[in-house]
Image (cartoon, helix red, strand yellow):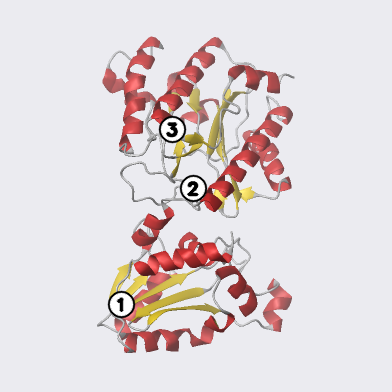
Amino acid sequence: MTSEFFTNNRKKLMEKLEEGSVVLLYSGVAPVKSNDQEMSPFSVNRNFYYMTGIDTANVWLIMVKDARGVFETLFIDEPDEFTIKWNGKMLTREEASESSGLKADRVRYMQDLESYTASALYQGVEDVYFSFDRMNMKAAPTRAEEYARTIREKFPMARIKNAAKLISSLRSIKTPEEIDCIRRADDVTIEALKHMLRTARPGEYEYQWQADYEYYVARSGLRHGFETIAAAGENAVMLHYSDNNCVARDGDLLLVDLGAEYKYYSADVSRTFPINGKFTDRQKELFTIVKEAMAVAKEKMRPGVATKESNQAVLDFYKKALRTAKLITDDSDVSKYYYHGVSHSLGLDTHDPCDRKEYEPGMVVTCEPGLYVAEEGIGIRLENDVLVTEGAAEDLTGDRLLDIREIEELMAR
């Protein structure tokens, strides 16, 4: 990504706002793990990153739109020798400028933050936008929420608003640069899976299969977009099982749901493999049904088609296919074996925000039908990452590791 990408994102956002608006976006802070101070890994707020290209903790971006124009300012911690000696290098003005595309004189130190914000509000700003992304009532207040509360107390005339939906609308449509990042993440994910299949063995723990996959990702210079799911046997009927601490037994299937991350853009891929390298006839039958469901869903991922239609197509397909597989006798029983949606948006977040109700060119979505047969100890999910184009969808993951013969030949001991 070049700084121009982030500059354009800020421009698009500010074009959506009226005069008299200010946007305050925060990069976030690392969580504290017990008494380990600031030793936990830091993960940048993705909306902040989308606007700046900066992945450093405790940085504010403030954008003001008034009658004079738009003014963008970054606030960073002032580097000091003591902190550098203990925790390593700190972000400099020059580095912040280079990443974000802001001029160096628009990068200031954190001690100026409150006076700058107060000045903007005093000069007539009425709408104050933050990026709020609270998912439940029990989560601890974020720094953005705390700062919004302070502004509401000190400037009761200000209207606090949420910019998250506006940014989500921008993030829903991916640029060629973003698509290339996801494509790279998919490629490494598949190659890492091939490495896993060549090295892991029946009788090893799920976390050992996981380790073989994650080793290859790390050696490729990438990180992980989310916690790896490696679910053997009956564990695979739990959608977000991630304990990965059971034995992968000979004769069972292993369902993996995982994704490498490149420049913060994540792949999201699911595959299901025979632990001993050979599918049984029943496993082949159900695997083939899920693979066919993937094709049915992908066919619906075209411009102008409602996003809900891809999942409905899978449900309609399963009403027939699961009868043939002797799993159901009534259409209403499909939900016993398939109990999640077939698609979600993908990008900087594994479940990327998206405000689209119909597919549009530039959207990147997952295609992930599954079957979960608890009474047989079988869970199968196949998931690819798909780019919506003007015509038929482009499968960024492709048909790699979806062919039974290919899988068995790769796993041949």
Dot 1 surroundings within 10 Å: few (below 14), some, or many (20 or more)? some
Measured from the top left, where is residue 297 in percent x and y? 40, 29
Residue plotted at (73% across, 77% down)? 85
Q: Earlier in the sequence, mark 1 or mark 2?
A: 1
Whether the residues at callouts 1 and 2 have beta carbons within 8 Å, the answer is: no
Instruction: Decide if residue 208 is in sight here.
Output: no
Mark 2 residue type: Thr
Q: Residue furthest front?
A: 390
Side (left or right) of 286 relative to 119: right
Residue 175 higher or lower than 49, as above or below: above
- Residue under label 3: 392
Indicate which label's residue lies in the foreground, 1 or 3: 3
If you read the primary sequence from the N terminus, does the residue marked by circle 3 or circle 2 appear first? 2
Residue at 69 percent of width and 72 percent of height: 87
Instruction: Check disc 3 and give the amino acid type.
Output: Ala
Residue highlighted by disc 1: 19
Q: Secondary structure at mark 3?
A: loop
Q: Earlier in the sequence, mark 1 or mark 3?
A: 1
Name which residue lies at 44% across and 23% down.
374
Residue 350's disc is: 2
Rate crowding at label 3 as few (under 14), some (14 to 19) or many (20 or more) other CA atoms within 10 Å.
Answer: some
Judge whether residue 151 can be spotted in this image. Answer: yes
Q: Where 319 sits versus 97, above or below?
A: above
Numbered-mark total: 3
- What kind of element bears circle 1? loop
Image depth: mark 1 or mark 2 in front: 1
